[in-house]
Amino acid sequence: MSSWLLRELVPADYQTAMALWNDTPGVRATESPEEFDRILARNPGLSCVARDGDKIIAAILCCHDGRRGYLYHLAVAES
């Protein structure tokens, strides 16, 4: 049985989250590390990752402009 953990996406997740998004058909992530950090800082608690051990198995990057919400990237790894 797998044991996974859901937690907030943090700047240290940049490389692995970008790899997951860009390895997923139909998803293209192009944010620089600085843009990624800015999105997370302006939108605390809106983005998260699911981890199975040391591996990110899902990630979602979300933000808002004070009125509308945006889902930038969402991917779940194939099992």
Image: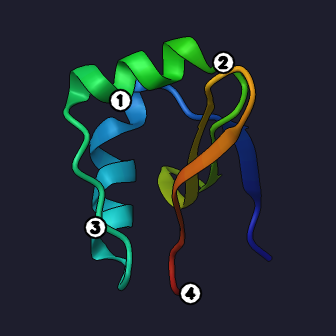
19 displayed left or right of 51: left
Label 4 environment density (alpha carbons within 10 Å; few <14, some 14–19, many ≥20): few
Q: Which residue is mark 4?
A: 79
Tell me how many marks there are. Answer: 4
Residue 38 picture location, percent across and down:
39, 16
Q: Residue 61 appears in which quarter of the rendering?
A: top right
Label 3 environment density (alpha carbons within 10 Å; few <14, some 14–19, many ≥20): some
72 displayed left or right of 8: left
The answer to which of marks 4 and 1 sits earlier in the sequence is 1
Q: CA distance from mark 3 to mark 4?
A: 17 Å
Which is more foreground, mark 2 or mark 4?
2
Q: Which residue is mark 2?
A: 44
Q: Which residue is mark 1?
A: 36
Q: Which residue is mark 3?
A: 22
The answer to which of marks 1 and 2 sits earlier in the sequence is 1
The vertical placement of 40 against 22, above or below, is above
What amino acid does circle 3 point to? Asn
Q: Nearer the viewer, residue 12 or 52?
A: 12
- Check disc 3 and report its element: helix, strand or loop: helix
The vertical placement of 71 against 12, above or below, is below
The answer to which of marks 3 and 2 sits earlier in the sequence is 3
